Image: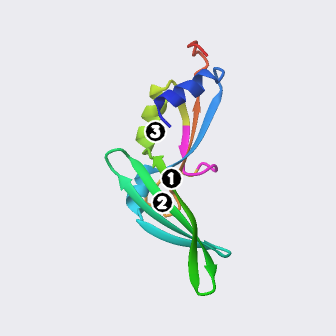
Amino acid sequence: MDRKALEAVRRSTRPGGFLVLWLTNKDWILQHFQARSWSRTGGTVLLEDRSFDRCSSFLRSRWEFFHRRGPTLRSKGAFQVDLRLYSPRELRALLDSAGWTMRSLATNFQGDPIDARNPQGGAMVAVAARPTGDRRPR
């Protein structure tokens, strides 16, 4: 997501319309970063290896899925996900530069405040509006 994409969404939204974004909070990632984690759902095991580039703010995650066959794990495939992360301050500036007005920023859809120290606070929910007086081309 970048400014050009947000500008395109703004152009396709009526004045007074809303944009809701659900993102990972960069500040939270920096405080709670784990380079590797394992998780299991049923017979599938997920290995996630992560790296974070502080210069570009990209989080790179490599996910590899395994299936348990007796005492051994067999790889069933892997893929990589790259996410551009934003801090609350960076997100507000990005939305402003794309012509949006920030209405609210919370850690969840219930509106709880953002706190990077909260172990459950890794998400950001931003609600922005296209200003009602915005006459820029759609």
Q: Which of marks 3 and 1 is in front?
A: 1
The three-letter code of the residue at mark 1 reads: Val
Look at the image and tell me whether residue 9 can be seen. yes
Query: Which one is nearer the viewer's eye here, 132 or 42?
Result: 42
Nearer to us of marks 3 and 2 is 2
Which residue, given by chain and number where applicable, does mark 3 sit on? 91
Q: Does the magenta stretch include residue 38?
A: no
Where does the C terminus fall, quadrant-wise?
Answer: top right
Q: Name the residue under label 2.
A: 62
Give percent across and percent down for residue 23. Answer: 53, 47
* Discs 1, 2 touching: Cβ within 8 Å: yes
Q: Residue at x 63, y 82 (%)?
A: 69
- Going by the picture, which residue comes out furthest to the left? 55
**Residue matched to label 1:** 81
Q: State whether residue 130 appears in this view.
A: no
Image x and y of residue 55, in percent: 31, 46
